[in-house]
Image: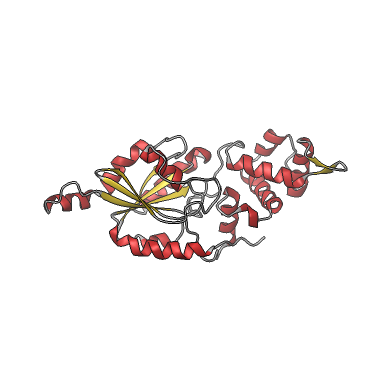
Amino acid sequence: MHYQWYPGHMTKAKRMMQEDIKLIDLVIELVDARLPLSSRNPDIDDLGKNKARLILLNKADLADERANEAWAEWFQDKGYYVTKINSRNGTGIKTINGIVKAACKEKIERDRKRGIINRPVRAMVVGIPNVGKSTFINTYAGRACTKTGNKPGVTKGKQWIKLSKSLELLDTPGILWPKFDDQAIGLKLALVGSINDDILNTTELAIELIKFLTTNYPNILSARYGVEETKDSVSMLNKIAHNRNFKLKGDILDIDKAARILLDEFRNGVLGRITLEQPS
């Protein structure tokens, strides 16, 4: 399966972000804690040159805690400020104000020396589609500021949000890069829902997930679905459909339904805390 998705609005979004970056003191980048590297748009590093940088490991509750710690250390070693959050229930959100002040300490001190008082830190919130930017902003602000959804591409335009006298956020649409040079990255993004399912073959995607889980998280599928784990991922998906009694007319196994359920349960953390990649 070939993983590719780059709607026209993303080109417009990238151009808009390039125009707005001169107004920005801090780039807050959300990544999916289950695939922190693959869920980063490499364009963001060019965009955020010479700006303070904060990485938020979002959905950290869905990822391996040991992997979360390893990724946090990996990003810190590269000069980023970083913290783990769950934007849905607010875990980790209270730590962000202090980190923003630390990241923008030089800017705040520079303003003070110039006699500029109460000029807010302006932060651009960036990330790929469906990484949780809008949910994060609403939770951080304590009110519904932006539209949210569990499909990529909900945010279409930019929006300034005043959080306090000292901080303003610029919400931006999620942008993917024009082409996945590494299809393994496309696969991982598809697994967590960052590429629209409507253009994917969910059965093939579920088979790839089974391959990964049996190799890296043995017994997790047998515990959940009562199937014997083998190297035959297609057979395992059939057995999941059989054990869950997913059937079509004529007593035919509904493989598509089994694939959708498997993907949904992985994405929602029902299978457990799973990380798709580790820091090198």
Q: Residue 52 appears in which quarter of the rendering?
A: bottom left
Query: Is 158 or 206 nearer to us in this picture?
Result: 158
Q: Is residue 199 visible?
A: yes
Residue at (56, 57) in percent of width and height = 185
Instruction: Return the x and y of residue 178 as percentages of the image width and height.
Output: 52, 66
Q: Residue 180 appears in which quarter of the rendering?
A: bottom right
Q: Is residue 70 visible?
A: no
Quadrant location of the N terminus?
bottom right
Q: Is residue 166 left or right of residue 232?
A: left
Q: Is residue 277 left or right of residue 215?
A: left
Residue at (54, 52) in percent of width and height = 152
Q: Is residue 21 above or below residue 228?
A: below
Instruction: Return the x and y of residue 124 as percentages of the image width and height.
Output: 35, 53
Instruction: Return the x and y of residue 224 as percentages of the image width and height.
Output: 68, 34
Query: Is 231 or 52 nearer to us in this picture?
Result: 52
Residue at (62, 37) in percent of width and height = 271
Instruction: Return the x and y of residue 129 as percentages of the image width and height.
Output: 50, 53
